[in-house]
Image (spheres, rainbow, N blue to C red):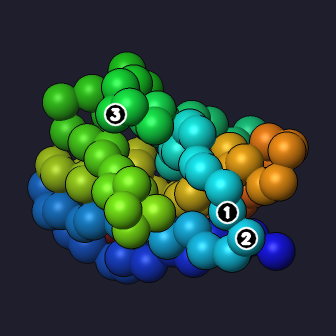
Amino acid sequence: QVQLVESGGGLVQAGGSLRLSCVVSGNIVSIATMGWYRQVPGKQRELVAVISSGGSANHADSVKGRFTISRDNAKNTVYLQMNSLEPEDTGVYYCNARVVVSLLVNNYWGQGTQVTVSS
């Protein structure tokens, strides 16, 4: 059993900052790619940022220069530092991890954390 638990969402004014965290726990051999996605009602879930086990990161064009993804492999944790938040960043943010369990690589999701940016 693998669990992803997110924290750090909330309500913030435009221009403000939030830091999301996601802890992966359970029967883990190793964690490959970790990432953050977001979804708003009526739209598909979209990739915000992704980071490899070696620390190579990619960010969506819409958040480049404002958001930074990082990870702490010792803590099985991925972070998303969000600065200069805009109302368009509002949505439910989901943590994703590709986890090696036994001999298989499985894809896991967190329960989501709401981020609301007021104008």
Query: Type of residue at label 3?
Result: Gly
Lateral position of residue 112 relative to residue 77, left or right: right
Q: Which of marks 3 and 1 is nearer the N terminus?
A: 1
Label 3 vs label 1: CA separation? 19 Å
Q: Would you say 66 lies left or right of 5 here?
A: left
Q: Quarter holding the N terminus?
A: bottom right
Amino acid type at image mark 2: Asn
Q: Residue at left 20%, top 39%?
A: 66
Q: Name the residue under label 1.
A: 28
Helix, strand or loop at disc 1? loop
Give the mark toward the camera: 2 or 3: 2
Residue at which label 3 appears: 55
Amino acid found under the numbered disc labelled 1: Ile
Label ID, residue 27: 2
Q: Are marks 2 and 1 in contact (CB under 8 Å)?
A: yes
Q: Residue at x 66, y 56 (%)?
A: 29
Q: Residue at x 73, y 70 (%)?
A: 27
Cα distance between the residues tagged 2 and 3: 22 Å
